Amino acid sequence: MLATRTFLVNNNYVSLMGWKQIISDSNHFHLIGTSESLKEIAPLDGASNHLILADLSKDGDKSLPQIAQLILQPNVDVLLVVDLADHALIQKLKEMGIRGILTTHCDAQEIKTALESIRLGKRFYCGDILDVLIKPQAPQKTQKSNEILSGREIEVLEWVVKGLTTQEIAEELNVSTHTINSHRKNMLKKLELTSPVELIVYAVKSGLVDL
């Protein structure tokens, strides 16, 4: 498989966090250019996979038009670094469908995990970003959770938060693992979440389940 062609935007942050070294250490990404602005990136070749790594921590939402244009191009992904205090921008990026969001506080391991997740077609929001995204919506969801989730789903959720595996939960409730997996999927759909980690974080922060 060919390495993803990678651009770095805003060299100050890139240098600080060692982006170039992280990319050079990976067999899956190939650095082909750097830029001070998203506006400087020319239309990309849709025949190859591209990843744009950009720092928005100083620009705020000024670069949103360029990001919107980039993600409309075929085979283009973006991984963005934002100011954790800019909650409005973080929410906008999520609504745009951006699959990779980090903060300036993320360490090298989180960067590597984000790169690998995006390479595999998955989404990666660091823990701080998840806190921002979940917290504003928690009061509304908390109010509706007991109505949306069935009693059995809440019971399953309690075991999930306690760290039990699907098999262990199935044994506790004397049901099949298929049934437990169905409950997990239904809860994610009802609460508009996308991963087990988000489900656990939401359950605890909303007060739906006590640790």
Image: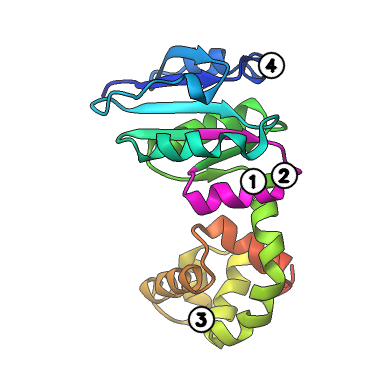
Can see residue 209?
no
Q: Residue 86 carries which label?
A: 2
In what element is the residue under mark 4? helix
Span of residues in magenta: 79-99
Q: Locate residue 103, reporting x and y percent.
A: 67, 36
In what element is the residue under mark 1? helix
Which one is in front in this view, the residue at disc 1 or the one at disc 4?
1
Which one is in front in this view, the residue at disc 2 or the one at disc 3?
2
* Disc 4 to disc 3, C-alpha distance: 50 Å
Say what amino acid the circle numbered 1 marks: Leu
* Disc 1 to disc 4, C-alpha distance: 23 Å
Q: Do the residues labelled 2 and 1 touch (CB within 8 Å)?
A: yes
Which one is in front in this view, the residue at disc 4 or the one at disc 2?
2
Q: Earlier in the sequence, mark 1 or mark 4?
A: 4
Q: Residues within 10 Å of mark 1 (few under 14, many from 20)?
A: some
Say what amino acid the circle numbered 2 marks: Asp
Q: Locate residue 91, reporting x and y percent.
A: 61, 52
Say what amino acid the circle numbered 3 marks: Leu
* Disc 2 to disc 3, C-alpha distance: 43 Å
Q: Are marks 3 and 1 in contact (CB under 8 Å)?
A: no
